[in-house]
Amino acid sequence: MTTLETHYKKIKDLHHEEAVAPGTGLCAGCGGLEGLRLGLKELGNDVLICNAAGCFTLLSVYPFTPLKGSWLYTTMGGPVPAAQGVRDALDIQLSRKTLTEDDNLSIVVVAGDGSSNDIGLGATSAALHRKLDFIYFCYDNEAYGNTGFQLSASSPYGSSTQTTPSVKFHPVGAELNKKNLFDIWRAQEPTYIATVSPREPIDLSNKFAKAKNLVGPRMFICMSPCPTGWGFNPKDTQLIAKLAVDTGIFPIKEYFEGKVIHTKQPRRRLPVEKFLETQKRFSHLFEPERKSDVIEQIQKTVDKYWEPYE
Amino acid sequence: MFRVRLHGRGGQGIKTASQILGSAAFFSGFQAQDFPLYGAERRGAPIVAFTRINRQNILERGPILVPDILLIGDESLLEDIQAAPLCGADNFTAIFINSSRLPEKLQENYSLSTLPHVLDITSLCVKFLDNGSSTSAAIAAVGARLLGQIEFPALKEAVELELNAQGINSDLRKKNIDLAEEVFQLLTPMEVKERPEKNITSSKLISSEQKPVVLAAPIILEPGNMALRKTGNWRLDRPEIDYEHCNNCLICYARCPDGVIGIKTDGSPEIDYDHCKGCLICAQECPGHFIKTVKESGSWE
């Protein structure tokens, strides 16, 4: 099933130099930070990060920065327009020879699922239309995590958030389905799209290594288990990232040259409840009584997704 | 008025403790105010919460700068310059520290002006809840007991109310109430030295002169300087690599979100304890279980 070009086969092959210094104020066990750390290792230090407001606001807190490259902080809706502005400025300087090719930077947008699915999507769509040359990294923890875990368009059906708790008249919690950002992006045919998981460092690094040498919009969605918002012990971050893949809830795939390929397809999918039961945000599906219809509905959605591929 | 300031780490239940204490005071006929200080820090990072308790209406607002009671839920905070839990404490301030050490030793080591009240809350939480970091009910019980003006039934009602609001199930609420009762019995009320109330006077308006914008423009000259901020004291447990058995597979290195596991020249992994936040992913993910976890207990002794 794997047809990904492989630069790396073993963990030992990965770059040893860290691109994100420790000391950040992000939660212990943050899945998104792990994704960013592995991704930036691959992209190197000649990057300019346009960071949308979100959890990763805490990456750089004046006068400190964990990054070796540059950082531009923007509003939640603004990282992609910022990326366009910086790209244009660099291109103009390069064409006027006021900057040399050595001074060139890759532009990386770092945004959460709230910015990516809701507030910043319009501007992203416009940039995809213009074929802006940039890399987009969306850390998807399926809610507005930084402000206390409120519903975003990425919050899955059946999950409890601050704004959609399981209550008498809305026992399910979030009643809407998660937006399919991958396919929304794909409709505009960017150069490259990939979903990545922090639990699959080799797959993740290979995808970044591949995207690095391409031109045009290159998009990443990173599954980001969130101990604080999802309600689990931080040590289980990677375990939950693994279960999301093994149950088929989070498909690991890439889109390149018109084709979608699953780079890590589970051989035998586990039932979705193996994933759901690990987190407090789904605990209302099991207690005080089991909501079998909701769990079945989630399973059906996952089954329907995989049907054409199995 | 009693001003209680609570210090702890994110995820420890310090905010909830301030709420329980506030509710318990309210059920005992007091007026109460409780709130945390919201900042950009999270699980494991220093957290501050406040409770004001008074017989009359409380008109005072904002953070408590000079506390009457300091409840410190994590001893390692005393060494944290940014958390500075002792800030504003004076001879009137009663200090409580969650620690397994003797009060005299703590007083000497941290140069405290008064002898602190001490109880090993973490061990009690492990005993009652099987979780050393769910300290909300226990810390609130300490506050209620030290004050000496809140009876246990009011505390019990408050624990029930606040934990229910957090979605804690009845079985765990019961265990928390038992824990609170145990704490209540282990401590005796302190001698309350009520601070003379100060009259609040209006302050003068200060007008500042216009300076060039560049003075305030944030410029960071050193890339990667975040490493100067040590997050090692966020840890409740410490991962330790058993080098005798470690086969250098480096899975821990790949899986550490903060990138604090480096690779030594001989190819073996090494944990940077200055920055390790203690998420324990490494211990969980080590295929051979060669990383063990040890409870943190401060760096002195």
Image: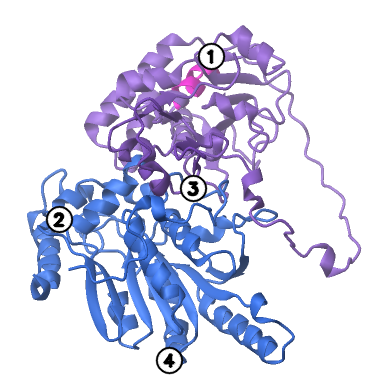
User: For the magenta stretch, what is the residue range?
Assistant: B140-150
Question: Do dots 2 and 4 share one subunit?
Answer: yes
Comparing labels 1 and 3, the label whose residue is closer to the camera: 3
Chain B's shade in the image?
A: purple
Comparing labels 3 and 4, the label whose residue is closer to the camera: 3
Identify the residue at horizontal 34%, vertical 58% (top origin): A202
Q: Picture coordinates of residue B50 (x, y %)?
A: 57, 36
User: In this rendering, does residue A167 appear at all?
Assistant: no
**A52 shown above or below B116:** below
Q: Picture coordinates of residue B191 (x, y %)?
A: 61, 11
Q: Picture coordinates of residue A64 (x, y %)?
A: 66, 53
Front position in the image: A237 or A216? A216
Chain A's shade in the image?
A: blue
Q: Amino acid at mark 2?
A: Val
Identify the residue at horizontal 62%, vertical 80% (top origin): A86
Q: Amino acid at mark 1?
A: Val
